[in-house]
């Protein structure tokens, strides 16, 4: 498997692309399939509904000037053609990759692909159900980007011998419900923290290219610029209704900030081999990403969480430990294991509450929302 | 639709699956204007649709919509938000160990 093959992105015609893909398929043999035990990974996106009438009622008039600029920029599609492999796509030696790293890296690729794919499903649904032209246009553009990212990651997965299975549509799937404002808070933060995560890794690897164990990291800069634009769009959506970022909703904002930051901290610490290979200390990384995300979210949120408070780091560590203990206790049976599970859950909840009740930092939200990616 | 009873509807639909390098996506569109509400379940009838790499497959199929009962719809509206963190992307799965 150490031979270099021609890539589908090199193809000049559809026929050539298909022939290359077919040849690649034949090349990935059963041995590799068993080895990874995930050769056919069923993508399992979730399906959501929301209050589509409320979405239709959004009026972007108060932010029209900024809105039109952003949409025009997204329509001009600066990243079209970027997500193609070129000579910068180095050969990946999957066979000799350390097994722990390989597992974690494949988890990274599959999770990222599923997330992009789910984003695409959600945005497309909003586009389809909506009747407000501004809103449907935005969601169409975002769905385009997400599908493009998913395709790019899928290609990296194929190179690793993994095939995603899109057969989920013929399985029974349940539609859950989210309130529009929760979608704004969660996706806004998700897009902005995604930008901060990718750009921090990109800059780190610029300075330490010896740690770049896979070429996909070279594409992170333009990739995260898409995430950045999507975040801008959600910021403008929230700006159209001042109620969304004032009064009782500030408590919701604080909840989402705390939940997103602490979940990221816990998940990253569960992937030590990945971070070691990148030469990144997950504690340093978390602080960097929180700092950047907080700075960005000041564009629309009137508070930021106090990440330099002495209780902040201490409780993140407690939460991470409780989570690890909980997973361990879940593998055991019997009354002792039950008590351990209860104990670990209680500790995780207490740690989260302690993080949540650290006094927030207040600040004034600027009149103009739009920003440019500068990190 | 009753408080506790579920209705079953059939709807013609178009399924589009793109397994291309430029775009990986999959969508279902109901062709009779059927609308999905919280708690409903949808199943596209027929064998699994697999698009080979590099291709878009578009097929007309029948879908079964299992309508949630009134109570279930209300419950989904009230509790769906609890899962909202799913919308956030963290690069990794939630598995503690792999």
Image (cartoon, rainbow, N blue to C red):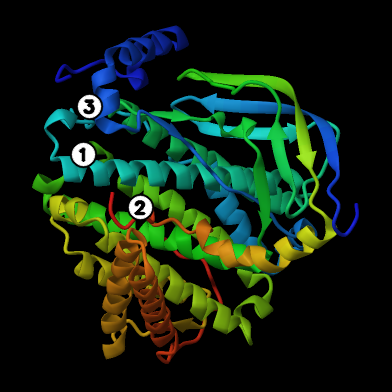
A104 vs A335, left or right, is left
**Dot 2, how many residues are within 10 Å of its Cα: few (below 14), some (14-19), or many (20+)?**
many
The quarter holding residue A337 reads bottom left
Foreground tag (3 vs 1):
1
The quarter of the displayed image where residue A305 is located: bottom left
Instruction: Name which residue lies at 55% across and 33% down.
Output: B25
The outermost residue toward the left is A210
Label 3 lies in what chain?
A
**Of residues A363 and B65, the one drawn nearer to the viewer in this rendering:** B65
Q: Is residue A373 visible?
A: no
Q: Secondary structure at mark 3?
A: loop
Q: Which mark is residue A87?
A: 3
User: Marks 3 and 2, how far apart in space?
Assistant: 28 Å
Placement of A8 over or under A290, stated as above or below: above
Query: Around disc 1, counting alpha carbons within 10 Å, would you say few (fewer than 14), some (14 to 19), or many (20 or more)?
Result: some
Task: Confirm whether circles 3 and 2 share one chain.
Answer: no
Task: Work out whether B72 lies above or below A368.
Answer: above
Which residue position is annotated with label 1? A214
Name, please, the residue furthest toward the right: B2
Q: Say whether residue A194 is left or right of residue A255.
A: left
Q: Are marks 3 and 2 in contact (CB under 8 Å)?
A: no
Give the chain of mark 2.
Answer: B
The earlier-in-sequence mark between 3 and 1 is 3
Contact between labelled residues 1 and 2, with CB atoms less than 8 Å apart: no
Question: Would residue A332 be found to the left or right of residue A134 on screen?
Answer: left
Q: Which of the pair A157/A242 is nearer the observer?
A: A157
Badge 1 marks a residue whose secondary structure is: loop
Residue at numbered disc 2: B92
Most distant residue in the bottom direction: A359
Task: Pinpoint residue B7: horizontal percent, then vertical percent.
Answer: 86, 44
């Amino acid at each position: 498997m150490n031979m270099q093959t021609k890539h589908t992105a090199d193809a000049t015609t559809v026929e050539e692309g298909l022939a290359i893909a077919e040849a690649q398929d034949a090349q990935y043999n059963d041995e590799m399939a068993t080895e990874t035990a995930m050769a056919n990974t069923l993508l399992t996106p979730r399906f959501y509904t929301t209050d589509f009438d409320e979405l239709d009622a959004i009026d972007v008039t108060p932010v029209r000037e900024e809105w039109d600029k952003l949409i025009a920029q997204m329509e001009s599609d600066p990243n079209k053609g970027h997500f193609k492999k070129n000579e910068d796509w180095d050969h990946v030696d999957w066979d000799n990759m350390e097994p722990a790293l390989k597992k974690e890296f494949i988890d990274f690729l599959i999770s990222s692909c599923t997330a992009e794919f789910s984003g695409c499903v959600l945005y497309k649904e909003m586009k389809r159900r909506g009747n407000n032209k501004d809103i449907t246009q935005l969601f169409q553009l975002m769905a385009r980007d997400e599908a493009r990212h998913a395709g790019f990651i899928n290609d990296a997965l194929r190179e690793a011998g993994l095939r995603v299975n899109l057969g989920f549509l013929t399985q029974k799937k349940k539609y859950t419900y989210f309130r529009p404002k929760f979608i704004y808070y969660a996706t806004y933060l998700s897009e902005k923290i995604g930008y901060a995560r990718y750009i921090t890794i990109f800059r780190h690897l610029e300075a330490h290219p010896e740690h770049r164990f896979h070429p996909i990291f070279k594409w992170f800069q333009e990739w995260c610029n898409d995430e950045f634009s999507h975040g801008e769009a959600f910021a403008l959506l929230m700006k159209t209704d001042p109620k969304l970022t004032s009064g009782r909703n500030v408590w919701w904002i604080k909840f989402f900030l705390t939940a997103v930051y602490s979940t990221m901290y816990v998940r990253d610490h569960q992937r030590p081999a990945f971070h070691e290979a990148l030469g990144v200390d997950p504690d340093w990384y978390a602080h960097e990403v929180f700092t950047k995300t907080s700075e960005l979210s000041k564009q629309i949120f009137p508070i930021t969480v106090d990440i330099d408070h002495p209780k902040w780091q201490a409780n993140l560590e407690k939460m991470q430990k409780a989570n690890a203990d909980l997973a361990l206790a879940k593998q055991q049976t019997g009354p002792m294991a039950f008590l351990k599970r209860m104990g670990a859950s209680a500790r995780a909840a207490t740690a989260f509450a302690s993080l949540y009740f650290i006094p927030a930092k207040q600040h004034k939200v600027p009149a103009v929302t739009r920003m440019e990616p500068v990190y | 639709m009753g408080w506790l009873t579920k209705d079953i509807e059939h709807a013609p639909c178009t399924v589009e699956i793109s397994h291309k390098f430029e775009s990986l996506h999959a969508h279902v569109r109901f062709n009779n204007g059927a609308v999905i509400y919280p708690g409903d379940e949808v199943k596209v009838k027929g064998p699994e649709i697999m698009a080979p790499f590099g291709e878009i497959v578009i097929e007309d199929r029948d879908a079964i919509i299992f309508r949630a009962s009134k109570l279930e719809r209300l419950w989904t509206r009230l509790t769906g938000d609890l899962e909202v963190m799913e919308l956030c992307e963290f690069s990794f799965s939630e598995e503690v160990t792999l």
